[in-house]
Image: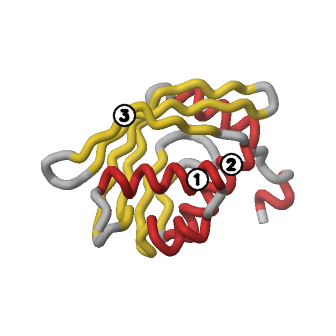
Amino acid sequence: MADNVEIVHKMYGCFKSGDMETLRNEVIAEDVIWDVPGHHPLAGTKHGVGEVLAFFGRLRALGAQVQPLGMGELSNGAVAEIYQAHGEANGAKLEAFNCNYYIIRDGKIAEVRVLMGDQHNYDAFVWAGVPLKPLPDRLA
């Protein structure tokens, strides 16, 4: 079995290449919980691999890019990392350093807590790229 840090590195490789099938089948647990803070349309807790992959797909469509800067396995087996996120959506620039805390279970990512270094910047970036539906559709 791969060590926990290798599993997180594999997730990043799949995200960058768009390999959602490997993420679904080999990297992310079916019942994953992925918590994204913020005040934007992509914020909140994602339940299950389907929701996480939809979130990843939207981030990729926005042009968000992430570069891991350092990670390590903690004494409890969890992985902590710091990464740089960057991108541009309709003139809003994302430049932030964030941290993730991963719980690995049975060789797959089972839970993730995202900690934003600049929440306001991330919120503005997402809002610029994910507009709300018009009012009649939004209220239905």
> Is 6 on the left or on the right of 48, as rendered?
left
Residue carrying label 2:
60
Question: Which is closer to the viewer, label 2 or label 1?
Answer: 1
- In the displayed structure, 50 sits above or below 82; it is below
Residue assigned mark 3: 70
**What whole-number distance in Å separates the C-alpha atoms at marks 1 and 3?**
17 Å
Q: Secondary structure at mark 3?
A: strand
Q: Residue 15 shows which numbered tag?
A: 1
Looking at the image, is mark 1 or mark 3 earlier in the sequence? 1
Is residue 52 shown left or right of residue 135? left
Q: Could you tell me which quadrant the C terminus lies in?
A: bottom right
Residue at 44%, 27% in the rendered image: 117
For the residues carrying marks 3 and 2, which lies nearer the camera in this image?
3
Label 2 and label 1: CA atoms lie apart by 8 Å
Q: In front here: 77 or 52?
A: 77
Query: Would you say 30 lies left or right of 53 here?
Result: left
Mark 2 residue type: Arg
Lateral position of residue 109 relative to residue 89, left or right: left
